[in-house]
Amino acid sequence: MADQKSPAVDPFAAWRDWLDQTERQLNNYFNQVMGTEQYARFLGQFGEFSLNMQKNMGETIGRYFASLTLPTKEDLAALGERLRALEERVASIERSSPALAPAGSAAALAGSTPRPPRTKKPLESGGKK
């Protein structure tokens, strides 16, 4: 008699089959549940609840920051916008009048720095020196 080896047994095959069947059953169940009117109504109510909670939390945090005299996100955004507008106005004034530019700025340095003397002579009409 020849030694016959049995094919390798996969110890996890039954577990994989059970997992596959369970996944299919749950998928079918949840597809049926999500197709109902009650589920759609629940999602709508949950969305409204979530938005109201977010709005109330934002207002509460805003009041809390105000009581601590701390700026809110909106306060910082408004301040940043005002600062940007001021910087643009100052830059336009400096561009229009270099004399008003601060001492270390590029516009002031360009107007006040003496240029070196020109030592190279232009070519004569013949094109050769």
Image (tube, rainbow, N blue to C red):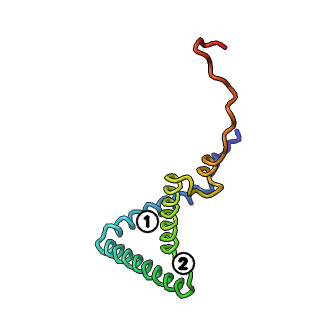
Residue 53: x and y, percent? 43, 80
- Disc 2 packing (10 Å; few <14; some 14–19; many ≥20): few
Q: Which residue is mark 1?
A: 26
Q: Is residue 44 left or right of residue 65?
A: left
- The kind of residue tagged 2 is Pro
Q: Residue furthest left?
A: 37
Disc 1 + disc 2, Cβ < 8 Å = no
Q: Residue furthest bottom?
A: 67
Q: Which label sits on residue 71?
A: 2
Q: Residue at x 50, y 75 (%)?
A: 75
Q: Is residue 25 left or right of residue 40?
A: right
Q: Which residue is at the front of the view, 57 or 34?
A: 57
Tell us which disc is closer to us: 1 or 2. Answer: 2
> What is the quadrant of residue 40 in the picture?
bottom left
Residue 45: x and y, percent? 35, 77
Residue 117: x and y, percent? 69, 34
| Disc 2 element | loop
> What is the quadrant of residue 13 in the picture?
bottom right
| Disc 1 element | helix
The C terminus: image quadrant: top right
Q: Residue at x 56, y 84 (%)?
A: 69
Q: Residue at x 51, y 52 (%)?
A: 95
Q: Which residue is at the front of the view, 74 or 56?
A: 74
Residue 55: x and y, percent? 42, 79
Q: Residue at x 58, y 14 (%)?
A: 125
Q: Which residue is at the front of the view, 92 or 47?
A: 92
- Disc 1 packing (10 Å; few <14; some 14–19; many ≥20): few
Distance from Cα at disc 1 to Cα at disc 2: 49 Å
- The kind of residue tagged 1 is Leu
The N terminus: image quadrant: top right
